[in-house]
Amino acid sequence: MGRIANTWQLAKVSWAVLRQDRELLLIPVLSFVSSLVVLGALLVPTLAVLDTSAGEDQSNPALAVIGIVAVLALSIISVFFNGALVAGAYERMSGGDPTVSSAMRRAMARLGGLLPWALLTATVGLVLQAIRERAGFLGDMMTRLAGAAWDVVTFLVVPAIVIGENSAVDGLKQSGSLLKQTWGENLAARVGFGLLGMLAMIPAVLVIALTGALGGVALAAGIVVAVLYVALVVVVMTALNAVFQTALYLYATTGSVPNGYENSSLRNSFSRR
């Protein structure tokens, strides 16, 4: 219960920090729109390939190439906008007054580190997925564990690139080093943020369940409301996660609690060995 309370308290503090710059919530929206644009641009060549491969074996190399391009492009978008969120949170915690423009400019300035990192992490994901598809039950479980371990080790890579101005490789090394040097309830906090997001989705499920009993127009309206609500939750949780990442990185590298977290339990998230 103590860890759950700690996670809830950190989430509230992170929201209090984010609330000072609510315009930063536009960044996850821009990320989503950019992803839709990329997928839309890839739709035409995908349909063309499907037309020419009608009646043929479904293992079409062209489709595989388009799929890889899509994964790499979406990874670049995700990492870049995550970097922009971290940049905005860092500016606020450093005493500044961030805007979407200032956050994007800092992320753009660190594109030399963010772009290679996006390609590297996407490649790792593709390799793990390929192994998972060809492995049995035990192999599938092992690759999922490897993926989870990768997520843990790389949790602070984007802040290391944006704030620490490291390269992708050096950012990975620093993220791993910080994980070894500092330990505590950070993993519980990360899992807790995920659980909070799942709990926040419950109202959407209830809306669909209630309107589903009525059917017709009510169900259609319920689905629209639920989808919009889920989108809002995803946007907020994405931004909160980036704020939390930034705070953890600053505390882990400086030993000082960043602005906005003075009265929080952040020290319990990275307890020094």
Image (cartoon, rainbow, N blue to C red):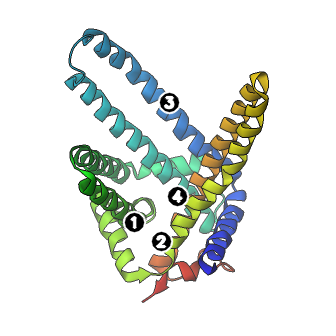
Vertical position of residue 155 compared to residue 135: above or below:
below
Q: Nearer the viewer, residue 57 or 160?
A: 57
Q: Position of residue 159 (x, y in %)?
A: 45, 62
- Name the side, left or right, on which 85 lies relative to 110: right
**Which kind of residue does numbered mark 1 sit on?**
Val
Q: Which residue is mark 3?
A: 36
Q: Is residue 259 visible?
A: no
Q: Which residue is mark 1?
A: 152
Closer mark to the observer between disc 4 and disc 1: 1
C-alpha span from label 2 to label 4: 19 Å
Q: Which residue is mark 2?
A: 187
Vertical position of residue 35 compared to residue 169: above or below:
above
Mark closest to the chain's N terminus, 2 or 4 = 4
Is the C-beta separation of discs 1 and 2 under 8 Å?
yes
**Which kind of residue does numbered mark 3 sit on?**
Leu
Is the C-beta separation of discs 4 and 1 under 8 Å?
no
